[in-house]
Image: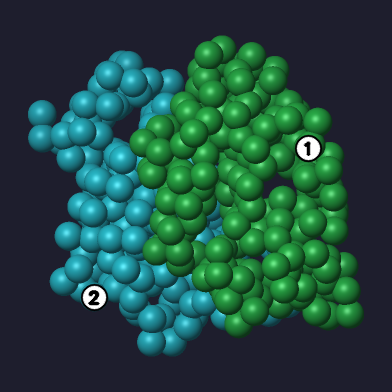
Chain colours: A cyan, B green
Amino acid sequence: MKIIKDLILNQGTNLGNGILKVDSFINHQVDPRLMEQCGQEFARRFAPVKPSRVLTAEISGIAPALMTARALEIPVVFARKSKPITMPDQVYLTVAPSHTKGVLVELIVSPEYLGHGERVLIIDDFLASGATINGLVRLTQTAGATLVGIGALIEKEFEDGRKRLASLNIPIESLVCITSMENGQIIFKDD
Amino acid sequence: MKIIKDLILNQGTNLGNGILKVDSFINHQVDPRLMEQCGQEFARRFAPVKPSRVLTAEISGIAPALMTARALEIPVVFARKSKPITMPDQVYLTVAPSHTKGVLVELIVSPEYLGHGERVLIIDDFLASGATINGLVRLTQTAGATLVGIGALIEKEFEDGRKRLASLNIPIESLVCITSMENGQIIFKDD
């Protein structure tokens, strides 16, 4: 999507080591109209695979996942990174390395909201190494649900997440794809 | 709002000690259409005070805050609970006790997205003791922005948050108000 590409070029910052700062419109401040447009675009691309539930990881996945779920008129579930006291004792839990925090984070979903028969669309802000999304894939599989698609606002192709997810054999869509962030530059796939 | 009250009665669980489980539509699984309706209702109530920015706290505040910001056509900023590497070294930081986690949590906002001249509307999922919202109030004041309103999906009146915020002398709106959760019951204000 040209609008995200332009925002990255105008407001994004290449912090080095593959870290892209997009705090002004995705990760800290959010432009709701932009998220709505992204949600509508994901809904258009994934409607053919008939998702019944959107799954994301707190925190920055919530906005695009919510707007995608709104456009598809289905519920969204956000995996928690710590278990709230409202959650039952028996949960689905997996562990994934956090790219930007340098630590392992837990991803937890209650069996109450992810179960057999659901057709799960995973939506997140970034597809980088694929570690977080792979955690969501494992939660989906453990729940006995069917994974039907994966969508990310921004893909960093050079971190190989898409390759790691290829064996799933499901549609993977990103709204912009960055092929290189070397030497302080940001190079897009369609450049 | 009758729709939230009905959802609390049909799907909510009184876990005791004032803890209300609403994981099926607010805190873990989210109904996007409901959040959109809540956002539109907050926008209707707060449009007269002309907010320029919605401020919330990750995690469960993001969905209602995003939809409120969408309806008002303004950006939303979510205070982070840990400092991402994309954030500058100088930030606004305050500490608030977490009602449901029993620990102190940090609330962090970058000066890049909250500054002088902004008219801040705080939106969160719960108004209980007011501790988290008071943290957001302090961040707003530290940033030199003007606080123009506070909105919460669900108010637990018996935890006195509204009383603690009264001296701010700004509109405080909740979409449903619970006056008692004693003896396993859930009593609403307009019952």
Which secondary structure, mark 2? loop
| Residue A152 visible in the displayed image | yes
Work out which quarter of the rendered image holds the C terminus of chain B and state it. Answer: bottom right
Q: Neighbour class for label 2 at 10 Å: few (<14), some, many (≥20)?
A: some
Q: Which residue is mark 2?
A: A50
Amino acid on which the number 2 mark rests in the picture: Lys
Q: Which residue is mark 1?
A: B165
User: What residue is drawn where x is 49% and y is 77%?
Assistant: A114
**Where B7 sits versus B107, above or below?**
below
Q: CA distance from mark 2 to mark 1?
A: 46 Å
**Where A61 sits versus B88, above or below?**
below
User: What residue is drawn where x is 23% and y is 60%?
Assistant: A43
Q: Nearer the viewer, residue B3 or A73?
A: B3
Q: Nearer the viewer, residue A156 or B89?
A: B89
* Mark 2 or 1: the one toward you: 1
Chain of the residue displaying label 2: A
- Whether label 2 touches label 1, CB < 8 Å: no
**Left or right: A80, with A25 as reference point:** right
User: What residue is drawn where x is 43% and y is 58%?
Assistant: B37
**For the residues tagged 2 and 1, is the chain the same?**
no
Q: Position of residue B115 (x, y in %)?
A: 55, 16
**Circle number at residue B175:** none
Work out which quarter of the rendered image holds the N terminus of chain B and state it. Answer: bottom right
**Where A32 sits versus B153, above or below?**
above
Amino acid on which the number 1 mark rests in the picture: Leu
**Left or right: A184, with A94 as reference point:** left
Q: Position of residue A167 (x, y in %)?
A: 27, 67
**Left or right: B133, with A57 as reference point:** right
User: What residue is drawn where x is 78% and y is 37%?
Assistant: B165
Q: Nearer the viewer, residue A78 or B121?
A: B121
